[in-house]
Image: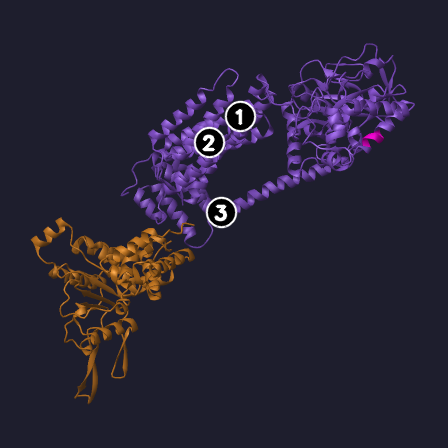
Chain colours: A purple, B orange
Amino acid sequence: MVRVSSLLNLLSYAAAALGVAPLFLYLDLPVRFALPLAFAAGIFCDRRRRYPLSGGSATLLSIVCFFLYAVQISRDHLIEPVVNILALLLAVRLVTEKNGRNYLQLFVLAVFALASSSLLTLSAAFFIYLVLLVTAVTVGLVLLSFHAVDPHLVFSRLQSRRIIGISLTLPAISLVLMLAFFVILPRTQYPLWNFLNPAATATAGFSEEVRPGSFAGIAAVKEVALRVESERLPRDELYWRGTVLNTPAGSTWVRQPPPSGEMARIRGGRAIPQTIYPEPKPGNHLFALDVPRGVEGLRSFQAGDYIFRARGALDRRVKYTAVSVVGGEFESTGPVDRDFYLAVPPRLSERVRQVAAGIAARGAGAGDRITLLEAFFANQQLEYATTDLPASDDPVDEFLFEKKRGYCEFFASSFALLLRLSGVPSRLVGGYYGGEYNEMGGYYLVTEDTAHVWVEALVDGRWLRLDPSRLARNAAASLLAPRAQGLNAGRRLLDTVDYHWNRAVVAYDLARQLQLLQQTNRQLRQFRVPFALPTVGGYLLAGIVGTIALVALVRRGRYSREERILQVFLRGVRKKHHLEAIPAATGLQELAKQLDDPVCREFAEIFGRGVYRDRKLTKEELKMLRVLIRKLGKTPRDRGFAGR
Amino acid sequence: MKLNKRAEVLRVIDTLSGQYLKGKVRAIRLAVITLLSGGHLLIEDIPGLGKTTLALALARALGLSFGRIQCTSDLLPSDITGLSIFDRDENRFRFIQGPIFNNIVLTDEINRAMPKTQSAMLEAMEERRVTVEGSTYPLPEPFLVIATQNPVEQIGTYPLPESQLDRFLITTGVGYPPVEVEKSIIQTGSIREEIRHIEALLSLEDITEAKRVVREEIYLSAKVTDYIFALVAATREHAFILSGISTRGGINLAAAARAAAYLEGRDYVVPEDVQTVAVAVGAHRLILRPEQEGLGKEEVLQSIVKSLPVPLV
């Protein structure tokens, strides 16, 4: 036995949870606390059937909540207050007594909440939430119609199962329609609101300039930066080149356009083609495996130092292909403006200058000086760390001689600076280092916490990649190990789903789908049947048909012929005489007598002659019964169900 | 499908209920069912509603011999069964048959007889023979006892215990006749005299044949048997009932249902036949719990019948 109200309670909680869940992270902290409390209180109150919040006070509370956030609404700050208002109204509704109207309000608020979440975020999960919410709300509305007639209605287990089963067909049908529309209708690639108003979040991870010492600590965020479809590569090669920072301005390294006439070419090595899917974000750097030879699939321009930038902002989902070379030589072909790559900021500590002078004096060529500098770095016992960082005006000096700890920006900028001071042209390269290969998707997942800065030095006309962070005494534990960790299994699976969702759904393009279809068609035509496909197909088809037939047979077998014809007859009788149900204790003869229906009487006679003589009905009898059932449908109803 | 002698049996019912015993068709039908299934009938009703008339008319119409016992507290077993008296001419004891040696025996006010006499009577009903002084005498066939008792008057009675009641196949009331019928009865007076002139509509052979058909040709399917069992089992599990219908009650129910089906002109029993006779056959066998004794046994059994699903397939 199930009470309709308890079913409705369950559904309204489910709907509320589904509506709020995708929003939850965007809510204010107090609201985040209030919601679970409201859920708990609501369930508790429903159990005890006592509600501390009366209708009037609930309305008052709703109005207070509304005004609390309504005053915060402005042109730049619109969605967050609205979302919070929705969540608070939902919370208030959860703890009040639930009558028909309140259930309806709960459902509406849940739908609005879910809809508003699409303004803030867009991911594959939204679809799941939507399907579940639609299901819960539809079933809820059907039950609500029962609740409206009698709030204390109690269903038997069979009844409730049947009602829910029937109401589930509604969302099932609409889902099919949704899928059909999905193919035709255009869709957005952006979260609706965040696209219009780019989030003013702090750039964690890759940034366009290197400013060691600007933060006392940095927090690593495991947010997806890009996904790269490529073959598997050795871990040491996973340098994703994004930008070159060639000018130190004070303690900050920035990018200037490389000196005109600078040219380079890449010789030898192994070409690695990649398809790259960057996550939407501000900026237009196109990342690719170090060193990229070219980028295609997106309008872009290339600088002389092989830095590629998109012509537009990368604030929507795009993809591009790149070909990189591993193990080749990055040769400078044009004249190199050595002064440009040797410029240093004027304010440098004496200690730093002395170290550079010592290296310049001892080392003859660029190669030697690099070796000497590496030895110096190793000697300093520097530590790779992201907390308790040097934060003075001269972070290089403090990093090398005082704190002796820092992250890649400190290592790289100090290294490049010392190289320049000792007469080796050098520059910083920003990008990502690391990435985890997702076997399921066949792609590298590069997260923001693997943002990295390294150094390129010009040695004998070739740019060499140097990673001074590897010279940290704890490099193995702090730099390399976390980058090898990647996501855990669950998140990896989710990421695979998200990846495919983005590829197939968000970046969906009808023209491309058709192209794919044509391609498939072409391939199919060329496809040679490796073995007797028709035979296998035949067996398969036979198997499917056989299974269906078997299921149908078993289903038929569950009921005998007599049972089936009786069901049809009783349905006909109910329809003709407008009976809701025929009491189980009424036999057919009795029924015929009460209804005073000659057709019923005749049916009862023929049917009983078989059934109550413990034998199967003969073919003729069945035929007669079918005729009677047809007659039942035709003869007009003459009398009601007498005596009932 | 032809059921032997059914037309004749129905004619008896029609004649009796149409001409002589107006408005008593249910009681007559039950009496005929009792006769056909070889049981005995207990009519429970207040005096003066025509219990005796019914029994008399039935005996006449059926063309059977009729005996009558008026029970009193000093009635002896030998007053019913008969006794041996010494025949001086033949110089030996000769057995004089009591009133029980008739096809139809009307036992008026059976609850006025002493338990000893009651049990002798009931024993004869069950055994269908009488043993007096070492000799066993079979009772005639068919043998139908119609006992009456007054349920209201309890002074100076020996109420039949439930175990004895179990031996009656059917218990029924007679009920007041319909208003118009009663008025005409009041106007024209008792019909006892007319009853004497009822002609026998059936012969002994007819009745024997009808009984045979009921016993042998009416088919009782497994489903209906299950239904009867379910009904019996339900009375045993019912919250109001201390002791439900016995196995003998089940047998009687089946037999009565057969007879009911025969009267309906079917050679198979349908659950409705069981429902028709269920209360008449079953109610008097129930013993209600002391706290539920205020309820009528008929109503309790009727509610069970109403709640029990009928096997349709």
Q: Is residue B17 left or right of residue A386?
A: left
Nearer the N terminus, badge 2 or badge 3? 2
Q: Looking at the picture, does residue B3 appear above or below residue A559?
A: below
Q: What element does badge 1 sit on?
A: helix
Location of mark 3 (residue): A559
**Residue range highlighted in magenta:** A374-378
Q: Residue at x 13, y 51 (%)?
A: B181
Location of mark 2 (residue): A138
Q: Is residue A421 left or right of residue B32?
A: right
Number of the label disc, if any, that sits on residue A117: 1
Q: What element does badge 2 sit on?
A: helix
Type of amino acid at the residue the image marks with label 3: Tyr
Q: Farthest residue in the right direction? A: A364
Contact between labelled residues 1 and 2, with CB atoms less than 8 Å apart: no
B113 or A334, which is in the foreground? A334
A390 or B139, which is in the foreground? A390
Q: Is residue A66 left or right of residue A249?
A: left
